[in-house]
Image (spheres, rainbow, N blue to C red):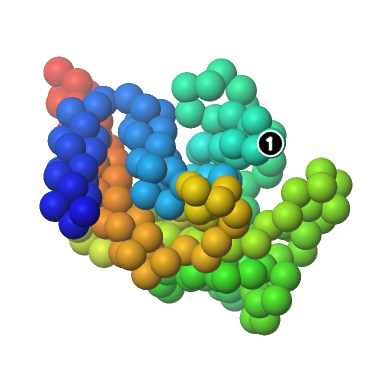
């Protein structure tokens, strides 16, 4: 199993390095996250240029048949997540904000029983739709310079046999972190190439 996972991570690494379309890169990351964890819900946030907000790039939820962002052609209408409070202090109340600021992965077994983080947004969504947010994994995208450029949030890992929601295992978390790191490096490299290309064209 370990050899299979290493082989798969190498394959996804090659795919990420060869792809030029950032939307496709976003989708490759999230699809592989689904393969690893069988998470029902998957959201990818990328940090804004000024570092003050996190923009929704990909939003997927299988049981809700939700496909937004990326190459789907459906815009994500949710406002960006604020990384700072009104008094300019860091927003650590949400697990995405916490991961974005600290670089730590947050693994929640049950959002309704967890203390220390604000899950009011998820609970309001559940109340309006009948969904039940339970296990949540928030993984920062850190590139080779340890710069945090985004956060991947996975919701409700699922047992493939029983179809029941389970917690994200340590193995799932470790593999998701490796994937996030690969994705961050690939995205950073694409940005650097684009910046160099623009600089070269400006000289010409």
Going by the image, does 172 lie left or right of 181? Answer: right
Quadrant hosting residue 191: top left
Residue at image location 78% in from the left, 59% down from the top: 123
Quarter of the picture containing the C terminus is top left
Identify the residue position indicated by label 1 in the image: 64
Residue at image location 71% in from the left, 66% down from the top: 119
Quadrant hosting residue 132: bottom right
Quadrant hosting residue 22: top left
Expressed as whole percent of the image width and height from the top left, the position of residue 115 reads: 67, 81
User: Exactly how many numbered labels are in the figure?
Assistant: 1
Camera sees residue 86: no
Quarter of the picture containing the N terminus is bottom left
Give the residue at the far right of this rendering.
Answer: 128
Task: Between residue 84 and residue 75, name the one nearer to us.
Answer: 75
Residue at image location 70% in from the left, 76% down from the top: 113
Task: Between residue 160 and residue 39, name the one nearer to us.
Answer: 160
């Amino acid at each position: 199993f370990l050899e299979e996972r290493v082989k798969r991570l190498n394959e996804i690494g090659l795919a990420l390095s060869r792809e030029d379309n950032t939307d496709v890169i976003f989708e490759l990351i999230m699809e592989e996250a689904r393969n690893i964890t069988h998470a029902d819900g998957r959201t990818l946030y990328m940090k804004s240029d000024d570092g003050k907000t996190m923009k929704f790039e990909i939003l997927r939820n299988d049981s809700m048949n939700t496909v937004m962002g990326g190459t789907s052609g459906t815009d994500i209408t949710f406002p960006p997540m604020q990384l700072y409070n009104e008094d300019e202090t860091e927003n650590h109340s949400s697990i995405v904000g916490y991961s974005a600021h600290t670089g730590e992965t947050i693994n929640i077994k049950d959002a309704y029983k967890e203390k220390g983080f604000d899950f009011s947004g998820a609970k309001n969504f559940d109340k309006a739709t009948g969904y039940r947010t339970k296990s949540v994994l928030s993984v920062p995208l850190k590139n080779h310079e340890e710069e945090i450029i985004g956060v991947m949030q996975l919701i409700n890992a699922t047992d493939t046999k029983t179809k029941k929601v389970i917690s994200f295992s340590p193995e799932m978390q470790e593999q998701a972190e490796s994937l996030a790191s690969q994705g961050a490096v690939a995205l950073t490299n694409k940005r650097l190439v684009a910046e160099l290309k623009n600089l070269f064209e400006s000289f010409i």
